[in-house]
Structures are given as structure tokens and as C-alpha cells.
Image (cartoon, rainbow, N blue to C red):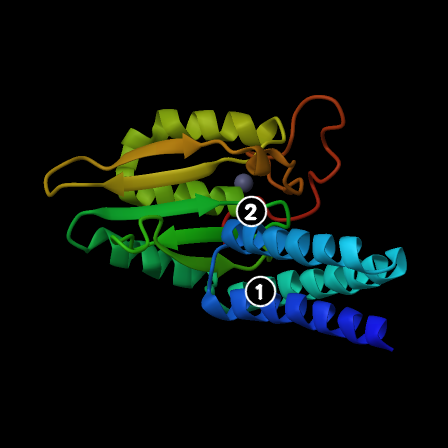
């Protein structure tokens, strides 16, 4: 009976830790670090004082609780991201263009299609607020190029040629366009992260369809231009 009480209290402590971390708004790394420390402390304490079965039971409850907390945090995060359609994105870019520097906008096509957008960076959020354009009847890569050109004009040519090369080889990039001081030109760069290299869905677009081995699986099945 006493063993059962210890198991219940130990599991409850870990679940309360997950709940508190989630409510605190801590980032994923901090949450994982706190969770790992709490698990190590609780499971070690059980291992030296309780039968092995108690450790396994609490570890299983902890794993399920951690997974639930992660999924819930992901859903919460997605709900906080404002959703735009392509017309709304163009309006966002016009707004960014009319601001006082520093002005920035980041555009990224994730594996799932659509667009992830960041804009309006400040000291608290140097990467900017997040927006999302759901996948739809448009080529997201064309939409990225269109927004970059809207801000930089022909200066974007070299950057977008490089971007298109990565996309056609099946690897996405984050396009970051910004202007730091009044009178400065807009500048752009491509950010490369391991997570960006997951092949994006093959767009049905003559400009962005993949080349090389296995190319053509998604080409020719829809509109190629931004609507
Ligand atoms: Zn395209």
C-alpha cells in the first residue's frame, strides 16, 4: 500500500512539473531540460528506495505525460500564429515596407507546404511575430519570390536564383529580407538549418519543380503561378 502511494505521489510530481513548465511559457529547450532533471531526480529516488516495478510504472506515466504536454504546447503555439491567405500576406508585406527601420520579414516553406512568415521584429522578438499561410492552390515558393521582389526589386535576382536552385534540388531555405536603417537598401539572405532541408512537397510549378533523380513526381498537376 505504501509502495503504491509513493508511485502515485512520484507520478503526480512529474505531471505537475510538466504542467507548471507549460504554464510558464518556457521554450522547448528549457522545458526539456527541466523535465529531464525532474525525471532523473524522481526516478533515481525511486530506484534506490522502491521495487523496480515502481520505477517502470512512474517512467511510463511520465513518458505519456511528457508527450501530452509537448503535443498540447504545439497546439497552443499553432493557435497563437496568425493565419493569412496570399492576399493577406501581400498586405503584410506592404505594411512592413511602410514601417520605419528596422524592417524585416522572413519567409519559409515547411515540408507540409504553405508558408511560415515572421515579421515586425523587436527587442523582445528579434525574429519577429509569426504568421502562417496554409497550403492551397498556389506555389508557396513563387509566393516567397514575389514577396522578396516586392521589397527588394531586381536586387533580389541573385538571391532568388540561389533560392530556386536549392528548392529544385529538394531543399528548402528561410529567406530573410530586411532593412536596418533609413536610406539603406533592402538586403536578403538565405538561412540554412538542418530542419529546412527536409524535401518540401513537390510543387506543381515549372519554376520550382524538383530536378534530378526522382524529379517530376509532383509536376504538371496544377497551376504554376501565384493566383
Ligand atoms: Zn513556383
Give the numbered dot on residue 17. Answer: none
Q: Is mark 1 within 8 Å of ligand 1?
A: no
**Image x and y of residue 47, in percent:** 78, 54
Q: Is mark 2 within 8 Å of ligand 1?
A: yes
Mark 2 closeness class: few <14, some 14–19, many ≥20 residues within 10 Å = many
What's the distance in space between the residues labelled 1 and 2, CA to CA? 29 Å
Quarter holding ligand 1: top right
The residue depicted at 15 percent of the width and 53 percent of the height is: 100
Outermost residue toward the left?
A: 183
Q: In the rendered structure, which disc, 1 or 2, sits on the residue that comes first in sequence?
A: 1
Q: Nearer the viewer, residue 212 or 46?
A: 46
Q: Nearer the viewer, residue 223 or 134?
A: 134
Q: Nearer the viewer, residue 134 or 70?
A: 70
Q: How many marks?
A: 2
> Under tag 2, what secondary structure?
loop
Q: Nearer the viewer, residue 111 or 121?
A: 121
Location of residue 125 (image quadrant):
bottom left
> Under tag 1, what secondary structure?
helix
Q: In the picture provided, is 80 more to the left or to the right than 153?
A: right
**Image x and y of residue 198, in percent:** 64, 36
Residue that numbered label 1 is attached to: 73
Mark 1 closeness class: few <14, some 14–19, many ≥20 residues within 10 Å = some
**Image x and y of residue 214, in percent:** 76, 27
Residue that numbered label 2 is attached to: 139
The residue depicted at 87 percent of the width and 55 percent of the height is: 52
**Foreground label between 1 and 2:** 1
**Image x and y of residue 165, in percent:** 52, 25
Outermost residue toward the top?
A: 212
The residue depicted at 73 percent of the width and 55 percent of the height is: 43
In the rendered view, would you say 135 is above or below 176? below
Name the image quarter holding the N terminus: bottom right
Asked if the residue at tag 2 contacts the one at tag 1, i.e. Cβ–Cβ closer than 8 Å, the answer is no
Amino acid at each position: 500500500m505504501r509502495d503504491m502511494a509513493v508511485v502515485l505521489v512520484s507520478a503526480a510530481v512529474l505531471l505537475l512539473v510538466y504542467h507548471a513548465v507549460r504554464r510558464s511559457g518556457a521554450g522547448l529547450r528549457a522545458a526539456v531540460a527541466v523535465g529531464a532533471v525532474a525525471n532523473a531526480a524522481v526516478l533515481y529516488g525511486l530506484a534506490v528506495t522502491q521495487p523496480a516495478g515502481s520505477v517502470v510504472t512512474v517512467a511510463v506515466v511520465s513518458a505519456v505525460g511528457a508527450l501530452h504536454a509537448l503535443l498540447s504546447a504545439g497546439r497552443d503555439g499553432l493557435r497563437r500564429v496568425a493565419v493569412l491567405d496570399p492576399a493577406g500576406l501581400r498586405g503584410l508585406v506592404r505594411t512592413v515596407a511602410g514601417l520605419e527601420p528596422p524592417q524585416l520579414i522572413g519567409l519559409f516553406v515547411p515540408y507540409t507546404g504553405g508558408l511560415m512568415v515572421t515579421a515586425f521584429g523587436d527587442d523582445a522578438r528579434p525574429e519577429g511575430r509569426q504568421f502562417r499561410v496554409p497550403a492551397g492552390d498556389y506555389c508557396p515558393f513563387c509566393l516567397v519570390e514575389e514577396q522578396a521582389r516586392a521589397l527588394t526589386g531586381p536586387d533580389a535576382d541573385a538571391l532568388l536564383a540561389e533560392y530556386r536552385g536549392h528548392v529544385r534540388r529538394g531543399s528548402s531555405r528561410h529567406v530573410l529580407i530586411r532593412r536596418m536603417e533609413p536610406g539603406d537598401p533592402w538586403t536578403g539572405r538565405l538561412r540554412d538549418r538542418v530542419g529546412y532541408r527536409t524535401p518540401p512537397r513537390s510543387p506543381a510549378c515549372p519554376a520550382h519543380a524538383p530536378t534530378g533523380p526522382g524529379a517530376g513526381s509532383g509536376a504538371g498537376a496544377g497551376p504554376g503561378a501565384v493566383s
